[in-house]
Amino acid sequence: MRGMVVLYVAVMALVTYLIRMLPFTLFRKKITSSFWRSFFFYVPYAVLAAMTFPAVFSATASLWSALCGVAVAAVLALCKRSLTVVALSACLAVFVAEGIQFGFVF
């Protein structure tokens, strides 16, 4: 069993290394295509959104409080507020929505 754990860690280390090393070896010269440059520019944002957005709806006690938080965050983001203001306001909106829904006294 101990040998399997060492094998698992070695495989994870190899995969992590390959993911970080391959772009440097495959793309030696500057990428001039505007399509690929914009693609590589937006990939981190798309991946972060794909990982984060579904978790927003399961992180609260109810779907309604999650929708309140998402609505507040979307409105503030469209108003060009800072990330800190957007995140804290969304958390506060969820807190208030759950307090109203579950009858907490403020």
Image: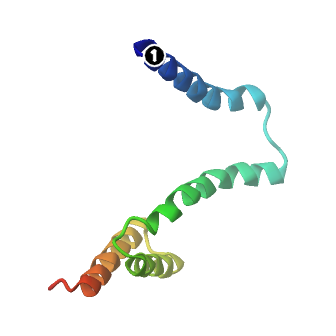
Q: Residue furthest top?
A: 3
* Quadrant of the snapshot with the N terminus: top left
Does residue 39 appear to the left or right of 65 in the view shown?
Answer: right
Residue 5 in the image, given as x and y percentages of width and height: 44, 20
Q: Which of the 4 image quarters holds residue 22?
A: top right
Q: Nearer the viewer, residue 44 or 62?
A: 62
Residue 85 in the image, given as x and y percentages of width and height: 37, 72
Q: Residue furthest right?
A: 33
Residue at the (43%, 66%) spot, across then down: 58
Residue 4 in the image, given as x and y percentages of width and height: 47, 17
Does residue 17 appear to the left or right of 33 in the view shown?
Answer: left
* Helix, strand or loop at mark 1: helix
Q: How many marks?
A: 1
Does residue 21 appear to the left or right of 88 in the view shown?
Answer: right
Mark 1 Cα shell of 10 Å, populated few (<14), some (14-19), many (≥20) = few
Residue 46 in the image, given as x and y percentages of width and height: 62, 57
Q: Amino acid at mark 1?
A: Val
Identify residue for label 1.
Answer: 6
* Quadrant of the snapshot with the C terminus: bottom left
Residue at the (74%, 54%) spot, across then down: 38
Q: Nearer the viewer, residue 13 or 6?
A: 6
Q: Nearer the viewer, residue 95 or 79?
A: 95
Does residue 77 appear to the left or right of 30 in the view shown?
Answer: left
Q: How is the image coloured?
A: rainbow
Does 50 sit above or below residue 100? above
Q: Residue furthest left?
A: 105
Residue at the (61%, 30%) spot, across then down: 20
Residue at the (53%, 23%) spot, across then down: 13
